[in-house]
Image: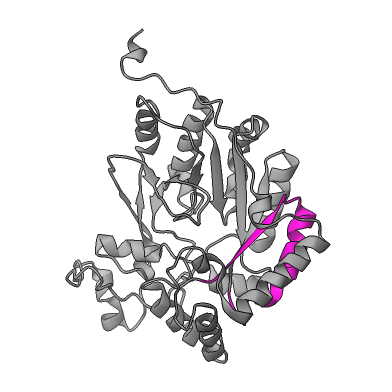
Amino acid sequence: MADKRPVRGATINEASRRFNLPAREADGDWLDAVEAIDGIASPLRTSVTIEHPRTIISRNQSPDVPFDRSINAYRGCEHGCIYCFARPSHAYHDLSPGLDFETKLFAKPSAAELLRTELAKPGYEVRPIAMGTNTDPYQPIERDWRITRSIIEVLAETGHPLSITTKSDRVVRDLDLLEPMARRGLAAVMVSMTSLDPRIALTVEPRAPHPERRLTAVRRLADAGVPVYVSISPVIPAITDHEVEHLIERAAEAGARGVFFLPVRLPHEVAPLFRAWLDDHFPDRAGKVMATIRSLRGGRENDPNFFTRMQGQGPWAELLATRFRIACRKHGLPHGAEARLALRCDLFRAPAGAQGELF
């Protein structure tokens, strides 16, 4: 009998030992023992735990990213992208960066309220807020929780600039908010694409929308006047790198204003997850893929250094960058720093604080 378990990204679910946390034990659910008793694999269910953070805006000082603050409505991501560099964050919760990251999610329903409070603080300095920098703001549970939408509502109300990165066409459901923000120079969207081949996409990012649906979203955003970009991220050697030129061509046809790319990164627990995934899905080229990754990461599986971590180094990285520039020039698309849009910060009006609301 065929295994009807929903497709997931990671093939293993090993606990992290970076923080010296004890291994978790089964919680007594009957599904914990069903495979041993009945000889069948139990379906992986997605659970959502409500998180109660004290603040919602995260700050960073990384010199190689174009934003200094971000908001993540969720922890974990059901899209299941095997390469996701956010996977190691689940280790902080004593959960595996593997299948736990895809199935044990956290939601922050108080995000909009917390955001309103932070924006109302005296001395708040406006800079664009980035969403989708860690986990996808439009992953499937957004359909019911609508936390991302509630955040955008606050930003639209206060005239605060916003950028969104997503692999989902669900972003167009919020066009009623994003279109008027874009007209005021307050919003931009980046749609991430890895492969146009649905078979590869299903393997690499199993629960993200079909590539053609994402391109349709690019077109709809462009037609609505929302500045939209395509990020070819990540480029995986010997698996997706042959598609770079075609992806750029399709992005241009869909109305993208610019394109970006990133070679695959394998920080912390992502590396063993990725290797196990390669052995399972691409055993014929696993060695070649990892050898190429090491060549563009200075002989290691991951390069944590600023700037080089984003573009890689060595002959393979240089060849990829050259191919990228030539394709962008051919299709008339700006790329890299020249493609970035400056959002307006002068329209912000702080929300009324607790005292202001009394009058």
Left or right: 278, with 199 as reference point:
left
Q: Residue at x 52, y 90 (%)?
A: 287
Quarter of the view holding residue 5: bottom left
Quadrant of the rendering where the C terminus is positioned: top left
Residue 211, image x and y in percent? 66, 62
Residue 43, image x and y in percent? 39, 70
Residue 330, image x and y in percent? 82, 63
Left or right: 229, with 300 as reference point:
right
Q: Residue furthest top?
A: 359
Q: Nearer the viewer, residue 341 or 138?
A: 341
- Total numbered circles: 0
Residue 20, magenta (yes or no): no
- Would residue 108 be visible to someone looking at this image? yes
Q: Residue at x 46, y 70 (%)?
A: 8
Left or right: 223, with 239 as reference point:
right
In this picture, which residue range is highlighted in magenta? Answer: 236-264
Residue 153 vs 353, above or below: the answer is below
- Would residue 45 be visible to someone looking at this image? no
Q: Nearer the viewer, residue 221 or 229?
A: 229
Residue 257, magenta (yes or no): yes
Q: How is the image coloured?
A: one colour
Quarter of the view holding residue 345: top right
Left or right: 3, with 237 as reference point:
left
Q: Nearer the viewer, residue 262 or 106?
A: 262
Residue 9 vs 104, above or below: the answer is below
